[in-house]
Every structure is written in structure tokens, then in C-alpha cells.
Image (tube, rainbow, N blue to C red):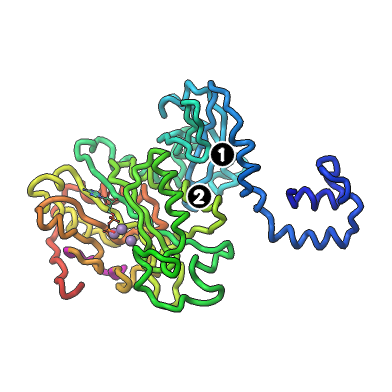
Amino acid sequence: MNLSIALLAALGSVAAFSPSSSHHSARPTTALRMVSQLEIQTGKSQLDTAVIERFNSLPYPDDKILAEYVWVDAKGECRSKTRTLPASRAKAVATLPKWNFDGSSTGQAPGDDSEVILRPCRMFKDPFRPRSDGVDNILVMCDTYTPAGVPLPTNSRAIAAKAFEGREDEEIWFGLEQEFTLFNLDQRTPLGWPKNGVPNRPQGPYYCSAGPENSFGRAVTDAHYRACLYAGIDISGTNGEVMPGQQEYQVGPCVGIDAGDQLQMSRYILQRVCEEFQVYCSLHPKPIVEGDWNGAGMHTNVSTKSMREPGGLAEIKKAIYKLAAKHQEHIAVYGEGNELRLTGKYETASIDKFSYGVANRGASVRIGRDTEAEGCGYFEDRRPSSNADPYLVTGKIMATIMEDVEVAEVKALDRAEA
Ligand code: ADP
Ligand code: MN
Ligand code: MN
Ligand code: MN
């Protein structure tokens, strides 16, 4: 029986809901003992598959769908709420209605004028509410506006969209590597770590590993992978990371602003999956500061059409010189707490100095070995942190590399410096 109902029944507050009358006579001392038990067990009943299945198997009305509207709040975290829509309105993002929410509850509007408008930008299938009747429930990535139609200051999508506008011919692709760290619900102990301690072996065996002593959180990453594929996200891979409990997945290549939409939705799906597994996920770039542990990034792989064509390496180098000239401007939008990660150690470059190199993981920007050998391909900006705003990162890169300016050449790092 659901413990919370038992407890409330014992306290006499919801006697009418209690399937058993025996608790009515419980003395206060028993009730108090149950309070402490409840704190530990809260949430367990929500994971009872038999209970969940009873309701999940109820059929939906075939002319209606559930739409989960997702948006980014003032802290860069995803929020969402659900509405019922006529199935006919969910055929394309253009026919989805706008919606609104109380911005005073998310730090996005003052209390006396609190309505924020949600504008649907991108639609996905909802992997958390699958249905088998040929109609899909949906997740809807939205951005945020005042009632007068002005983008909120926190609407970074609107800022990025300006950089991409009218540049469709460039066919810019982004592949985003999202690193993250899984913790126990205490939010202090990464998966695979002893409570109040550190792993008995240093970094080395955990990256891309297998085995119970090396790999922690595979059930979460596999569930997330499947959920993203089902949703229609272009998830392109996943791997265990260098620090135990740290993981990565990649989204892309995606075209232009779509990279931001897909990455944000993939983060929302990750949060939802972690909720199901009762595992805490952190996007902090340096979740463990003490000791020798890698931080977490959002490496951003970039190519335009001309970079992917024969001779594209020259285009790639031009773009890199432009990035070098604006290093600090980029760092400013590459994520909070990134200074803890970009130390020049643990496969990062210093936050103070731009560098690039071929196959060099200690550089700000890396050109892959294949790209150099083939003379065309893409480059990797390794600076963005795991909690960076993907709209700001992709938009800023686009704006910088599209600028019509002459910039000084930058010398590549020697292999010896790697
Ligand atoms: P790493 O070797 O740095 O760990 P990953 O394999 O994790 O690289 O991620 C590389 C990402 O770059 C993938 O998402 C991939 O789809 C993407 N990618 C591949 N080719 C291109 C390209 N031409 N332009 C942009 N992104 C690309
Ligand atoms: Mn990677
Ligand atoms: Mn990685
Ligand atoms: Mn990488």
C-alpha cells in the first residue's frame, strides 16, 4: 500500500481515501515514527511499474494529443507543462498555438505583469507518453516573449536566430558533445564513488569503459539514447567519460539554430530520464574541484558547406583566426564556472590564451587528423562548458566566422606542446 496514504490515514486527514480502517486508531507516536519513514520512502510508489502500467495502458481519445511545452528558464534550465490539443493542430509546428506561463515563478517576469508568452519553435515525439494508435503525443521546444511580442532578455534563441538569419546558404552544421555527471540523490556523491570518499583508482580505466568497477550510469545513458531517438533527436553517439560517473552523448550534425533546439530538448529528456531513475544529473563544468578529475564540456564541432568541400581546410583556418581574435568574447558566453575547468590541465587549454592544433586535445580549437589529411571537414571548439547555452555558443560562432574582417594568422601548436 502507498505509504503516504497510510500515513495520512494514520493522521486522520484523509480517512476517506484509506482502503483500510485499521490505521484510524494509530496513536500519534506511531504516526511520528511513520513520518521519518515517509521521508526516506517518498517517491518509491511512483516507480511501481504495476501502478504506472495500469494508467499508461488507458487508451487516448484519438482526436486529442498531449503536448508538453518546454522552455528555458532564467537559470538556463528547462521547465515544462502539459496541455491537451486537438490532434489536427499538432501536424506541424506552425499550427501549434502559442501558450503562456507565470514568469514570476521562474525569475522571468515581475509579479505585477507576470505573463510570459511561449512560442513553439520545434516539435518532437514524446518518448515519455508513447501511444500505439498511430497518433503521437509531442514535446514542444518553445522560446519566450513578453505579451507585446518582445523576446525576453533570457531568450537566447532569439539572439542566435539573428546570426543565422539569411545565412541558410552556408549550410552550417554543429555537432555538440554534451558531457554531464551523474550523482546519487545527495547531489554530492557521483555514481560509482564511495560516500564521503574518492575512488580507490585514479582516472584512466573509466573512459569508454565496461565492467562494474569502471562504468557507472549506463542504464541512464542507454535509456536517454533510446528516448532521444524515439523523439526524433539526431543523437549521434554516447560514451563513458574520464571521471567515474561522468558521461557524454553527442547531438548532430544539426543545421544552424536547430542544433540549439535539439540540444536543449535532449537536456530536458535527460532530466526526465534521471527523474525516472532517481539519479541526480549535474551539468556543472567542474563538479569535483579537489583532486585530479576532469571537468565537463560541450565541445562544439563546426563546419560550413565550403569547409566540407575540397580545399575547405583554408576556410577552417580562416574561421579559427577569427575565433582567436575574439577569444574573450567567446569565453564570456561559453558557460558559468568555466574558469574552474579551462586550466590548461585535464585535456583543456588555458582560459586566458587561445590556441589551436591538429589532433591536440590541449588546444582551445582542434582540427581532426582526418580533416587535415583530407584537406576539408570540420573543426572542434573545445572551450564551451557542459552548462553552456547552446543557442549562445552556436550563434556566437556563426556571428564571428561570418564577419567580413581581415585577421592575423595564428600559428598552430606544435605536437610537442600537446
Ligand atoms: P570527439 O572525438 O571529440 O570525442 P565525438 O565523436 O564525441 O568527438 O563528437 C563529434 C561530433 O561532431 C558528433 O556529434 C558528430 O556528428 C559531429 N560531426 C561530424 N562531422 C561533422 C561536421 N562535418 N560538422 C559538424 N559536426 C560534425
Ligand atoms: Mn566526444
Ligand atoms: Mn568527451
Ligand atoms: Mn570532443
Residues at badges 2 and 1 in contact (C-beta under 8 Å)?
no
Residue occupied by mark 1: 81
| For residue 47, side relative to residue 343 (left or right) | right
Q: Main secondary structure of the magenta part?
A: loop
The image quadrant that residue 261 belongs to is top left
Residue shown at 45%/46% (left/top)?
A: 153
Work out whether residue 221 or residue 310 is closer to the camera in this orientation and state it: 221
The residue range painted magenta reads: 349-358
Residue occupied by mark 2: 273
User: Mark 2 packing: few (<14 Cα in 10 Å), some, or many (20+)?
Assistant: many
Helix, strand or loop under label 1: strand
Q: CA distance from mark 2 to mark 1?
A: 16 Å
Q: Amino acid at mark 1?
A: Lys
Work out whether residue 130 or residue 54 is closer to the camera in this orientation and state it: 54
The image quadrant that residue 215 belongs to is bottom left
The image quadrant that residue 30 belongs to is bottom right
Q: Nearer the viewer, mark 2 or mark 1?
A: 2
Residue 356 included in the magenta stretch of the image: yes
Residue shown at 43%/54% (left/top)?
A: 221
Residue shown at 69%/57% (left/top)?
A: 41
Work out whether residue 285 or residue 220 is closer to the camera in this orientation and state it: 220
Compared to 180, does 156 lie above or below? above
Compared to 86, does 100 lie above or below? below
Is residue 314 visible in the rendered structure shown here? no
Is residue 408 visible in the rendered structure shown here? yes
Q: Amino acid at mark 2?
A: Val
Compared to 79, does 412 lie above or below? below
Q: Earlier in the sequence, mark 2 or mark 1?
A: 1
